[in-house]
Image (cartoon, rainbow, N blue to C red):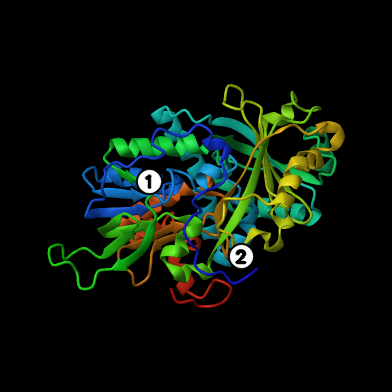
Amino acid sequence: MLIPEPAGLPSSNPTKSYWQTSPSPIANLRSTATLPAYSSYVIVGSGITGANIAYKLLEREPSAQIVLLEARQACSGATGRNGGHCKSGHYLTFARDAHLHGVDDAIKIAKWEELNVQNVRNFVESKGIKCDMEPVETVDLFSDLRAWENAIVAVSARRLALSEDIKNGFQDRILHDAEEAQEKFKSPSAVGAITFSAWTLHPYKLTTAILTEALQKGLNLQTSTPVLSITTQKPPNPNFPWQRWTVTTNRGQISADHVILATNAYTSHLYPPLSKFLIPTRAQIAAQRPGSGISEDSILARSYGFFTPGGHGDYMLSRSKGSSGEGDIIMGGGRALANGQEQPVTDDSTIHPVISRYLRQAPREHFGKENWGESGKVVAEWTGIMGVTVDGGPLIGEVPGRTGLWVCAGFNGHGMALALQSAEAIVRMILGEDEEQLDSWFPKAFRLSRFMQGNVHGAKHQL
């Protein structure tokens, strides 16, 4: 992989995401015709993270002035381009997390994800949001023996560390041996499987609904307003001496006390030192009709992650009954087939032809040609840009030495299971929650400050 340069702006003509076939009424919204000269908070990015930060800030500070800037349409980035999963998949790194960060931090990470997923559901229910959110049994299917052996170690370590919590209802993981996995999940090459409860949803509908809730609370949303730079004010504006930042866009400037970068893969565009740690990574997905031999089978009632030799990182779900596109298969992965595994890549205006061919046949490979039958028609193909960190954890916190500049990014393709809690954490930090209270639930492995502490690839880095 090449050493990345700072990310640029998002592509102006991205591929058409399946989820955005029917654009939201707020897709091109500008709450005001011109940008305000000043705002207490400027949030950059309108995905699941930025939307939740805006909503949570306004819950706590109803009179706060908040401007949310989006380079393209609302929710047009990774959130509006993902695979539709909402599952706590970080359990597979529990043993590694415990080794690198300590058991206490590994437990915090596990609880963070489980709580995040449940809180997504609670929010959807409490607000009556129609986003096709459905409970499913999710299956992590292993055809790679080493990956399966590592997964067993991770589950065992998790069970030992969380034994009392599991007794009290904390979700465990169920292991299935090769024979059971092959029979129950119709996967001839499976050497094992792990199941647990999860959700599928329409990520674009969810996020635009959260943005709509925030708009009703007073959020100023400005779409098609890319941020070109953020700079400190020197000297401070004499009329507003407490202001710290100037946010420059294609439509003018905004002065702000706090700037929050919810820009995931594109964060280094506005804060270049992060380019060494946060790698823009292109993911590709195909929506297709199910195979001829399996279209009415119970296999489609589940969501899947596939762990294969070569590590293609595949994932799949089927659109639930009553949803738009009912029965469509959403199949993602295949990144290992591209040179450099699609890193560093910020262009979501094209699809990779080799990955495209692979995704059309991948379900037949995972479930067997006899089980799957003939592949169904492809409905849509698109790409999206993930933010992948060098150590696998998100980046949450205030930039050291840059008072009022905050980052909440780097979700490694698992934003739906991390972003709600990440937004909660950054809002509490901004509002000055006691550090001891934060430490009780906030993993050190998720803090932006860890890059200053010499525990990332054994080197100390200057942010």
Residue 324 image position (x, y, % from top left): 57, 26
Task: Answer few, some or many: residues within 10 Å of disc 2's Cα (few below 14, many 20 plus, some between 14 and 19).
Answer: few
Location of residue 239 by image quarter: bottom left
| Relative to 48, residue 461 above or below | below
Q: Which residue is mark 2?
A: 99
In what quadrant of the picture does the N terminus appear?
A: bottom right
Please tell me which residue is depicted at 28% across the width and 38% down the height of the picture.
217
What residue would you read off at disc 1? 223
Distance Cα–Cα, label 2 vs label 1: 43 Å
Give me the residue at 34% from left, 35% from top. Answer: 213
Tell which circle, 2 or 1, labels the residue nearer the N-terminal end.
2
Q: Viewed as shown, does residue 311 lie left or right of 35?
A: right
Q: Position of residue 232 (x, y in %)?
A: 28, 69
Residue 174: x and y in percent read 69, 41
From the top left corner, tell me how far across and down residue 417 is, in percent: 53, 46
Closer to us: 49 or 265: 265
Say what secondary structure mark 1 lies in: loop
Most extreme residue toward the right, as rendered?
A: 370
